Image: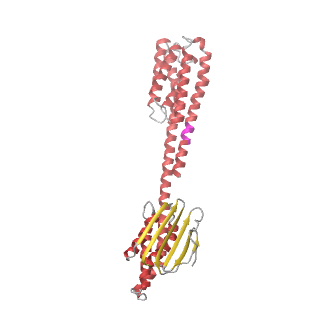
Amino acid sequence: MADDSSSSLAARYQRGTIIATVCMAGLWHGGFDTAAVLLKWPDFRWIWVSPLMWALFTALIVAAAVQLLRDGVVRRPWLGVVLTLTISVVVVVNADGRVIGFENWAFGAVGWLGVLASWGRSAAPLAAVLIGNGAASTIAMVLLAEPSLQDVAFVLTSLAGSAALQIALAYGVRTQSRIVDGAVGAATARAEVETRRMAAEQAHAARLQRHEFLQRTAAVALAGLADGTSDPVDPAVQRQCAIEAARLRRLFLEADDVPDPLLHEVRACLDVAESRGVPVRMSVSGEMPPVPVQARRDLIEPVVEVLGSARTHARVTILGDGGAVQVSVIADADISLAPTAAGQVRVECQREGESLWVQTSWTGRSPLPSSKTTRS
């Protein structure tokens, strides 16, 4: 989420600066250049040439603006540079070499197209436009207007003044992009660190929960064997050890990165029962949803007790419907389990002769309807 917000912030800054730059170029051309063409129309060498160049320059600005707003970059920038310099040469020639004046309206305007063409890439298109415009204007003035050295100096000064705003804007945009990119990179790095910290905290909390759980179960059984209070020959002790072994197997597998953790943990419990010589059949149907760790513990714990107590056979059925899971087991197990409904997991039990049927249900939406009547 932090990555998305940072990228969105960078995109907003980028689009905002593009809009501001396009507006500046449009206002310059639409205001100053339009007024120059209209006021000096009768003074042009060829009366229709400058209006045509004005229309071509307008089309270039509109095309560049559309591409920038849509793609963030101007396609074929050097074609735009060539057309821009052509406009500069034609306009200054049509003004009879009068560089400083309304007649040569392109003198201060063409740099804006250089700014747009350089957006998102090197400053080479802008540099080419500014240098080419200055050279073309100076040469045309020398050849057509017979200027004095003072006129040449004035032209160069004016060129520097008009180009300064465009260069400053281009540099400011690049500086802002670097700052925004740095901020986005820092935010992304902070988000990654925070994600790793949260993952580490969750893993540590899960380890503490497993340790506390084992202290209440497996540690008690091991302590009884160690101090001699539990007889390994006693079937009840053997059953309890089998149950604890299945619990340990399941807890060790909680952190495994597998497509379906629930089935992965249930199969581990089946392996423990089969190692005791109890054949277990398992069937799975439906679409399995992602089940939280604690819900998996609550779902599998009654199954572990039944499988650990099964004498000759067991059958496990897992049913998923995309938003809920039912895990049922039937075995000839001589234990007693009480129906419960704690949290999102419900346990149902039914005994018929030597067979014990237990079903655990979990849903992330609403409780699953029971397929059997529960009774003790």
* Quarter location, residue 252: bottom left
Specify the segment rendered in magenta. 12-17
For the residue pair 212 and 8, the one nearer the viewer reads as: 212
Q: How many marks?
A: 0
Judge from the rendering whether residue 236 lies leftward or rightward of residue 349; answer left or right. Answer: left
The question of residue 58 being in magenta is answered with no
- Indicate the quadrant containing the C terminus: top left, top right, bottom left or bottom right: bottom right
Q: Is residue 137 in sight in this rendering? A: no
Residue 48 horizontal/vertical position (percent): 56, 13
Magenta region's main secondary structure?
helix
Determine the residue positioned at 48% across, 55% down: 192
Residue 155 horizontal/vertical position (percent): 51, 20
Q: Is residue 203 in sight in this rendering? A: yes
Determine the residue positioned at 42% across, 64% down: 256
Q: Is residue 89 above or below residue 281?
A: above
Residue 175 horizontal/vertical position (percent): 50, 40
* Quarter location, residue 366: bottom right
Colouring method of the image? secondary structure
For the residue pair 357 and 144, the one nearer the viewer reads as: 357
Q: Is residue 316 above or below residue 224?
A: above
Q: Is residue 13 above or below residue 112?
A: below
The question of residue 16 being in magenta is answered with yes
